[in-house]
Every structure is written in C-alpha cells, then in structure tokens.
Image: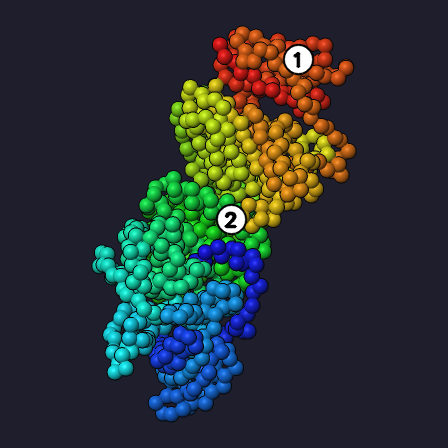
Amino acid sequence: MKAIKFLTLLFSLVFLNLNMQAQSVTDSIHVAHYSISIDTVAYSQQTIRANTTLQIVSKMNNISTVSLDLLVMNIDSVFNTSGTLNYSYNDTTLVVQLSNPVSTGDTLEFTVAYNGHPQKDASGFGGFYFSPTMAFNMGVGFAAIPHNLGKVWFPCVDVFDDKGAYDFHIRTLSNHKAYCNGFLNDSIIHSDGTTTWHWIMNDPIPTYLACLVTGPYISWTRNYSGIPIEIAALPADTANVSATFINLPAAINTFVDYYGPYPFNKIGYSLVNFTAGAMEHATNISIGRAFINGTLGYETLWAHELSHMWWGDKVTCKTDADMWLNEGWASFNEALFTQALYGNTAYKNWIRTNHRKVLQFAHISDGSYLALNAIPSDYTYGATAYQKGADIVHTLRNYLGDSLFKVGTQHYLDSFAYGNASSADLRDALTSATGINMNRFFDDWIFTPGFPHFSIDSVVYFPGGLDHYFVYTRQRSKGNLHVYKMPVDITFSNGITDTTVTVVIDSATNMFHIPLIIANATWVSLDRNEKISDAITDFEITPTTTGNQNMSETNSSLNVQNLSSTPSTIRIEHNWVAPDGFKQSNPGIRLSDYHYWKVDGIINPGFLSKITFQYNGSLSTSSGYLDNTLITGTEDSLVLLYRPSVANDWQIINANHNIGSAFDKIGSYTVDTMLIGEYALGYRDYTVSINNVSPKKNILSVQPNPAYDTCRINAELMKNEVGVLILLDVRGREIRKWKIDAKNSVVIDCTSLKNGEYVVQLLSQKKLLDSAKIIIHK
C-alpha cells in the first residue's frame, strides 16, 4: 500500500481508534475459509446487504463462543445448518454462541447475515468507498488501530496473522462487473438482468487483503510469460492503461529475477475513484484512476504495489510493528524497478533522495528515531517503515551482494510462503540461505534506532617497495549511542587510478594499515559508491562546463568559474551529525548541533569554483528542520566557518551571506573560492565564551593577480599587530608560511609553483582574519 503524500497526512492526523480494542482471538480459532455473498450494493444509499459463511478451525478445547470483528453493521441473523445461533453485538465485536463446545482441531461453520453502511477510516485512507456508479474497499486505515479494515464489510478475525481462502459472490447491475481476489470462476445472469460474479481465492491471505470493486468496468487483458493480467478500467481509461503500464513486463521480470516466480494466479489492478494512493489487495490491486493517466509519472506507484505480491501478500508481517517487511521492501522495489529500466545512475539518485528524506525528516514525522522492528502503531505507515525501510534494504543488498541477496530473499519468501514472518525470521532465513551470520547486521541496522556515521579522520602515507597507508577512521552516531560493525570501502585515487579495499569498522576509532601499489594517492575516500545508509548524503561530479552545478541532496551547489585542463572531481558530503568543536577557546560562536559539509576530491590546477551552502531553520516538512535549533534569533548572527582538515581549528571564512528576510531562517552562504576541507554553520552566542573575534573585511591585497613570476601581498594590520601569512594549495595543504606586519609586505616567488589556484590566509593569534585567492598563470 502506498499513500500519495502520506507524510503530510501523518503530520496533521489526530489518530482515532475505530476499533476501541483489538480482538485478538487467533490463539483460540483460525478462519480457514470465508464465503462472502453480497446481494445488494446500493450506490446512492451507500449500503450493502450481505452474508458471510465462515469455516473455522478450533485451536483450543472447550470453545463455546466465537468472537469476530465487524464494524457498525446491522445483524439480521446468525445461523448454521442446525438453525439459528444466539449472539451479542456492540458495533465492533460479534460474539456467537455455539450450539455445542468444540475441541482442538474441530471444524465449525456458520453464516452471518447483515446489512448497513460500511465505514471509512477517519484518516481518509482506508475502509469502504462509494461513488454514484462505483463501490470498492481499501483494506487498511491509517487512523484505525489495529489498522486492518476487513471488518468494515464482512465479519472476520481481522488481524495480520490469520490467513484464509475466499469465495466471493457479488451481484451487480446488468452493465456492471465485480472484481475480487483470485480468478473468476463463473458469472450467472439472473432474470432481472443482474449478474452474480463468483471469484475464488485459494491462496490464503489476511482479511485486509480481501477486496471488492464494482462498477461499469471492462477488462483490459494481456498474458505475459504465462501470467494472466487483468486490469479493470472504465471504457474511457483503456488507452491510458496501455500507455501507463507499458513497462509492466519489465517490472515482472525484475521482481521474478530477484524474488522468484510470481506467487499468485493473476496480476490484477482495478482503477477506482480514489486520489490518495493504492492498496495491494492480492491479485487485484486497487489504484486511483488519476494515477493511470497515460504517462509514466506514477509508474513507481503501480510497481510498488505489484512488488507487494511478494512482500506483504505472499509473506505478511506478523504484527504492525514489523511493517517495514511489507512497506520498506515495496518502497525499495521502486528503486530496483527504476534501476532495471533507467540504469544505475537513476537508481543511485532514487536512493540518495530517499536517504536524505529519512535523515532529515523521519524522526520528525514519526516522533523520534525508531527501530525498524518496533514501530509504534501510531506510526505504522510512517517514514520509518517506508523510507527508512527502503534505505536499509539498500544497505542489506550491498552487504550481501546481489547474488546472495537474491538467494537469501527467495529462501525467506519460500520458507514463509502464504504465512507470516518477523524481522527475526528474515534474519534467520538470510543466515541459513547465504551462510553469512546476519545477527550483527540486524542488531545494528534493524533492531537499533538511528544511524552510524563513518568518516576518515586522517591518512598517513609512507612510500616504499609498497606504498603504505595508515588510515584512521572514526565512527559517530545519529539518533543512538550504538557502535556498529560494518564493512566499508576505502578508495585510493591519484587522479588516474582508483583502488578500493574493504575494511571493517567496529569501534569509535579504527586504524587500518593498507599496503598498495599506488603511489601517493591524492584522495582517500570512504564509501564512495554510496553503498551504506549512514548519516551522510553525498554527491560527486566531474564538471565539464562552467556555470551552476546542483550537488543533489547535499544542500549545496557549485558555480564553476574555470575548468582545469585535466578534469577535476568534486565530492560534497553533507554530514548529518554535529561538527567537532573548537580546538582552542571558543570565540563566542555556537556551532551547529546537527550538520556540516565536507568538500573533497581531486582539484587540478586551473580549476576554480564558487560554492553555496543552503541553510534552513524553518519547520517546513519539505525543506526545513536543518538549522531550527541553531538559529535562535535573526540570521545576521550566523557565521560560516572553515577548516582545511580535522587537524585544524575552525575559522570564520569570508562569504557572501544571502539572507533575504532576516527572520525566516532561510538563506545561504556563497564562498568565492571553494577549498577542500570542512564547512560548518555557527551562531554568535556570547554565553558560550567571552572571546569575540570578528573577521575583518578586505585586509589582504594581492598584486598582480593572476601572477606570473612574483606577486606582492599587503596586510592592513593594526599598529604593532603581527600576523602569519600561510599559502595553501587547493587541497588546503600548507605550501609556505611568513610573518607579516603593518609595515611590511610579502613577495612570493611564483616561479617554483605550478600553474593553478592557491589561497593565502592571514592569521593573528591563531584566528583567521582574512583570506584571498591567488591564480598563478605562467
């Protein structure tokens, strides 16, 4: 099931309880079969008249009553072959008195005749819907707790883990059809022109997946690889069906390849008058007509629902706390389908966007950081189950590799076919099938809320017969205090060759000694291929044109001023953890407690770019919740800080502050010369320190610039003030250092320097006063 814009709904929804208390009776009985006969569907009155015969198996001795869920209906009678049965009913629970007690293994059967107006869920998603010529159900409700809504149209044991087979006998007007689960066994035309449609669903499904759709439909039919396909559409919609479902064969191929044969006897969709999404009723998915509009704009919606035939319908989560087993996997399958159709870049874009949304909003919309296997009922259909679930499946896929991922998931789906499973069941099935012990992975990623954050602290290089690298890594956390154990790729690059090795990070700090045949790597990066859903979103480009370059999902952008003769590669990491604090005394600046940026890559001589960092302290659920805890007043107290590496202290950097309104907490900083290193936001707050250092403007001047053989640097320092002038390359590495005062200038000999861009920084008492770029062109 997927609700369009469901996050917006969940933010504003006050959860109501349609069923005041869950009726958990599965310890005592199991309903093996439902036969649902609906004689009348009155569109204008919005009522039905029906009877349901239940075949029940006792799981205990001395059962004398049976409790069923049925919501706000009128009970006409309850009877079996021996006569009528006594019952009580309180608009939510029907308690049937049996003629004689039954024992374990006994089978009993009775029929409930009823009529009334089937209910809709208070949220707007779920329940039973009428339009002037159409009626249909959507099997779960966001507000109802428990969420199952089979009970709105037939008496049942309305839980996830009681599955039965079905017969449906639905009587319609002469020009209408009825569509239900399974296959159409027959249709009988009556003397009054009405028709009864008999559908049979032999594969057991839970009550929330049972369905009914009636209306003036025609069937759009195809057959693909032996699988019948039937789509119920209004005559005017058939052309849209053909166009929108053009990639249905690709979706079938993808899901069969990864998850095994299609698990039912038909693929079906019914187009209904519903604008909030779709529902994965087994073999007959209900989907809003508006989404089958002749374009490909909603193809991931119908693909999401199709993948539920494996994830949710073939195997269903045991409880709503494990809803990620249904919805997280179906959401991931949107990305898998996208990859199959449009390639790896499209897949990575989908994953990156989803990952950013999870890091930015999941803990906001769902009230806190949640473990995937312990989602509270109020947030069953929230961002954690859907988006974080998909995020972690992506990590699981890379952890196992595609081959074992397929082997493991197919073993799980076959082991629990047409039954129910928990996260622990998935863990054990993957372990059994792949030979990889999945306990630690599930402990870290499934059973623990929040995320890890992996980073390189420093790299030490020793040349020799082999080049020896000592890589020091660091692990932090977002939303937990947990230490993860995870294989992570480290990539060494010298601009020509990339070499990747895998290490296992398992503590707050690790040191790895890596001998390689690659001389003096100029860039060492962690998880460059974005295999792991840790607390980082990153984007990498090799610019081929000047101008603006959006660094997707990093809240930053480049404005490339000049290209290098040898292509440069830029990687921006948006780190969703707090930056390190000041190494020296705090100069009256409160650093962000939420995020910072890292610029990395290989910047070759001649490359020049501006970089813009966006901030947002609003409470917008589409773009905010980044800096709302940092910006406690007006934006003119914000500062942007920079450090070349973790060995350096934070210094205020001169940047253009694009405020707009000083009160909306939304704006950006643009740095004229992008440097490799880390950038963070700070807020002037003199309660954190008595020290207050303000950057001076235009202190440094460089002439000539660009320079050929020499250039002169002047500094407008205060009388008797002595500064330190540092020349850095574009990676932030120190080239030279001089002392400078107000009376003297520094002349730089450029003849020994390579063509390209450099930065000169002026420090006084270890505080950054100003910086300027120097371009050397000989």
* Tag count: 2
Question: In the image, which disc is placed on residue 714?
Answer: 1
Residue 702's spot in the image, x, y percent? Answer: 61, 14
Q: What residue type is labelled 1?
A: Asn
Q: Earlier in the sequence, mark 2 or mark 1?
A: 2
**Neighbours of disc 1 within 10 Å: few (<14), some (14-19), many (20+):** some
Q: Residue at x 48, y 19 (%)?
A: 606
Residue 328 visible in rendering: yes
Q: Residue at x 69, y 40 (%)?
A: 634
Q: What residue type is labelled 2?
A: Val
Residue 268 visible in rendering: no
Per the image, label 1 sits on a secondary structure element best described as strand
Picture layout, residue 249 above or below residue 721: below
Q: Are marks 2 and 1 in contact (CB under 8 Å)?
A: no
Res 722 → quadrant = top right
Of tags 2 and 1, which is closer to the observer? 1
Picture layout, residue 271 above or below residue 450: below
Q: Residue at x 62, y 21 (%)?
A: 771
Q: Name the residue under label 2.
A: 358
Observer-nearest of 448 and 325: 325
Q: Residue at x 68, y 23 (%)?
A: 697
